[in-house]
Image (cartoon, rainbow, N blue to C red):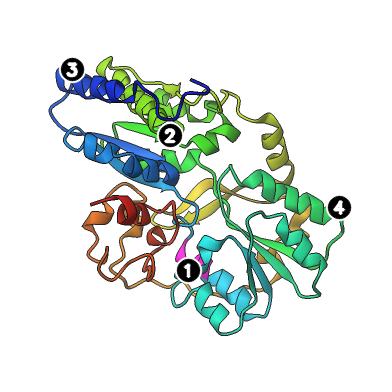
């Protein structure tokens, strides 16, 4: 499988086998599988899985897009820091995401200093070449967090005084536990995030089959990867069993990437964080350890934002918690488009709305 995951000749027979197994063995209702990762949402639409299984499997989008789960209040904090004259460094997707009243894109138009980078480590070079305070906006999951940890360690070693991070990173296992406790009986299986699993491995998901008896599979992002992942879930349901099956073995080990885990734990500790669409979830994020508090923008600056209840028809919160589809949103393709996004799910390329806009009906 290592070198044959693209254009696998057995993909069509595999999909036919899955469909037949569903029809013969199961179940007189559509199965509901949640793809946790936003990149999986893109692949499911891009490769036509949603259409192929339209009568037998309903794919639910999950909270696996880091931009989409960043709350409006956290966007407000970024905008507040930009308005104070600080030099903001961020990933490009965050620029257009609306907060309660505005977006970084609109603040740039009014003179805010914002640099878009592809790697957190680029913030080091920017900080060394300016006297302004440089604030890196740290968003992402376990996939990105090791590089952010490296940024903090490098800044510490170089004794940089004008660099800090606004830590908005999130971790995956406890948001899945939250989903399972709030959507009881509404998810038949999880397609677990491949990129995150490279770092944390398969072991942190064991509570899902053990406590909730829900089948899981770790899948890659090519068409055959997804086919094997869906096959695993259907097989588990057919056999009335549940486990964490790893169908991405060329990348994911049970124990994950130990070196990356050590790097993360050397800089960060668990914290309670707020997710768009979910609210506060205990131990689902990270904050800097005491040794690195001088790099914590939330402690370094007096960030003042109001808690605003958004008055909008946008349903991004419901979409990333599997409750509704982008096609159920009255704004979709109408008012909300990639050129004029109302919510974050239309901003990020990993967002469910952007994926449906590009590949859906």
Ranked by sequence position, the earlier of labels 3 and 1 is 3
For residue 219, side relative to residue 162 (left or right): left
Ranked by sequence position, the earlier of labels 3 and 2 is 3
Task: Please say whether residue 72 is one of the residues in the magenta stretch.
Answer: yes
Q: In this picture, which residue range is highlighted in magenta?
A: 71-75
The prevailing secondary structure element of the residues shown in magenta is: helix
Relative to 251, residue 46 above or below: below
In front: mark 4 or mark 1?
A: 1
In front: mark 1 or mark 2?
A: 2
**Disc 1: which residue:** 96
Residue at (55, 27) in percent of width and height:
252
**Disc 2: which residue:** 222
For residue 39, side relative to residue 15 (left or right): right
Q: CA distance from mark 3 to mark 1?
A: 46 Å
Ranked by sequence position, the earlier of labels 4 and 3 is 3
* Residue 182 visible: no
Residue at (40, 54) in percent of width and height:
351
Residue at (78, 62) in percent of width and height:
125
How many numbered marks, from 0 up? Answer: 4
């Amino acid at each position: 499988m290592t070198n044959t995951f693209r254009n696998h000749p057995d993909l069509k027979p595999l999909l036919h086998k899955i469909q037949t197994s569903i029809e013969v063995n199961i179940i007189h209702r559509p199965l509901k599988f949640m793809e946790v990762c936003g990149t999986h949402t893109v692949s499911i639409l891009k490769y036509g899985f949603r259409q192929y299984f339209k009568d037998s499997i309903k794919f639910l989008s999950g909270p696996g897009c880091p931009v989409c789960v960043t709350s409006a209040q956290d966007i407000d904090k970024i905008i507040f820091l930009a308005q104070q004259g600080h030099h903001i460094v961020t990933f490009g997707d965050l620029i257009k995401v609306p907060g309660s009243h505005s977006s970084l894109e609109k603040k740039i138009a009014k003179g805010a200093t914002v640099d878009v980078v592809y790697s957190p480590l680029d913030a080091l070079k920017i900080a060394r070449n300016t006297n302004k305070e440089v604030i890196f906006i740290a968003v992402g999951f376990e996939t990105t967090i090791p590089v952010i940890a490296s940024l903090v360690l490098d800044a510490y070693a170089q004794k940089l005084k004008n660099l800090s991070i606004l830590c908005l990173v999130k971790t995956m296992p406890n948001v899945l536990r939250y989903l399972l406790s709030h959507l009881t009986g509404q998810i038949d299986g999880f397609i677990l995030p491949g990129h995150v699993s490279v770092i944390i491995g398969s072991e942190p998901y064991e509570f899902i089959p053990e406590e909730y008896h829900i089948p899981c599979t770790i899948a890659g992002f090519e068409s055959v990867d997804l086919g094997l992942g869906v096959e695993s879930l259907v097989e588990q349901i057919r056999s009335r069993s549940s486990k964490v099956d790893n169908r991405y073995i060329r990348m994911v080990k049970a124990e994950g990437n130990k070196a990356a885990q050590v790097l993360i734990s050397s800089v960060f500790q668990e914290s309670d964080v707020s997710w768009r669409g979910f609210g506060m979830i205990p131990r689902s994020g990270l904050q800097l350890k005491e040794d690195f508090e001088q790099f914590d923008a939330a402690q370094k600056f007096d960030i003042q934002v109001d808690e605003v209840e958004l008055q909008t028809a946008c349903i991004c919160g419901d979409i990333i918690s599997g409750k509704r589809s982008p096609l159920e949103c009255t704004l979709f393709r109408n008012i909300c488009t990639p050129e004029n996004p109302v919510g974050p799910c239309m901003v990020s390329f990993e967002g469910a709305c952007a994926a449906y806009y590009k590949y859906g009906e």
